[in-house]
Amino acid sequence: MKLIYCVLLSGRWTAKRIDLYSQNLLVGKNAVGKSTVIRLLSTMAAFLSQRRLLNEVKIPVGGMIAIEDNEFTSIYRFAWVDTKISDEYLSVKYANGETKIWIERTSDEAKFDGAVVNPPQDKLLLNLKRDTVLYPELESIISWAENVDAFLFNEFDIDGDETLYSRFINGGDNLFTMVKALSPESIVNVINAADCMGYHLEKIEGVEFADIKKVLFTEKGVEDPLFDFSLSKGMFRTLYLLIYLEYIAKSGKPATLLIDDLCEGLDYDRSTKLGKYVFDYCSKNDIQLIATSNDSFLMDVVDLNYWSILQREGSKVSAISHKNHPELFEDFSFTGLSNFDLLSSDFIARHKNK
């Protein structure tokens, strides 16, 4: 399954429709809302999977998503206003062309499959009516939400007490757990990928000392291994991401991975190599990737067809992509300029004023 577009709301902040592909890079100037999109999309998934409860939120939140599954395409939206659900809607278009409305809900009335129901004001019908056998249409949305994870690359670090400080927005397994779960073949895959990025490792292993669990990294030609907490920030972030990708790929579940500030803080060589590797790996392993970046090195190696350029006017965020402005991207392809120039130059403004 794949997320094909989203609309997001938080307080007075709104992201208009953002079209999405199997692989995505959200770019834009500072403070246009790139990180906020990642956080709100992740938060929406947390509400739908019930990892977070709506009654914990005091401001209006909501949004709309479209999910493409093998047998149907679903459009789902909800709104939480004044501590109650004021809107909820689910329509499904099937492979035969038929469309069915499963959920219609306002502040005053709720219908499920055409019949009036009386759900609690703070509970989504999507969750209340969940049945993996009777209602696969609902299960598709919830399953997508359960397999969304997001982390903040530039904030991913080891805490001062030498335990993993996970910057996964929706949780995430620690490094030791993932390393122990990987097969020897998967560990070799990680070592080979790290080698291409200039981190020359001989061994990665999880070790236990009494009740302390750590990961050791042995570098080629270096006798003493490195504990995970002794790695540099760039090395730690890179290795964690490589291990995590291998870990979720081997789970066999369709996943959506959100990464904020991908490759932030890495040098040119490692930024370009890691960026290309992450996009290629996700493409080959059916992982939908939605990443943000301000890194010019990364932008120059990611195909413009995967770009969404975010712009903000006040509290409204919109996106320019190949899907909604194909002529802009086609015209730019004849300029001979680098990808980054599309963002840093006045090309977009001049094109709009034609």
Image (cartoon, helix red, strand yellow):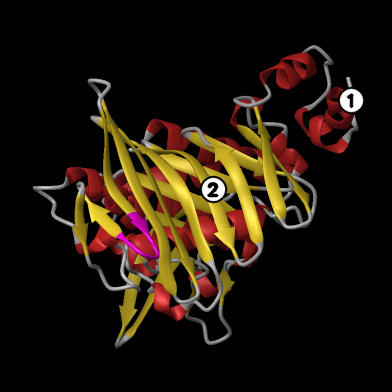
| Residue 134 covered by magenta stretch | no
Q: Give me the residue at 21% from left, 47% from top.
A: 114
Residue on which the image places disc 1: 353
Q: Position of residue 61 (x, y in %)?
A: 52, 65
> Relative to the observer, which residue lies in front, 97 or 324?
97
Q: Distance between the residues labelled 2 and 1?
A: 27 Å
Q: Position of residue 76 (x, y in %)?
A: 38, 47
The part of the image, by quadrant, that contains residue 145 is bottom left
**Which segment did they paint magenta?**
105-109
Residue on which the image places disc 2: 7
Q: 148 left or right of 161?
A: left
Q: Where is residue 265 in the image (x, y as percent from the top left)?
A: 71, 56
Name of the residue lying farthest toward the top = 334
Q: Are marks 2 and 1 in contact (CB under 8 Å)?
A: no
Under circle 1, the secondary element is loop
Quadrant of the rendering where the C terminus is positioned: top right
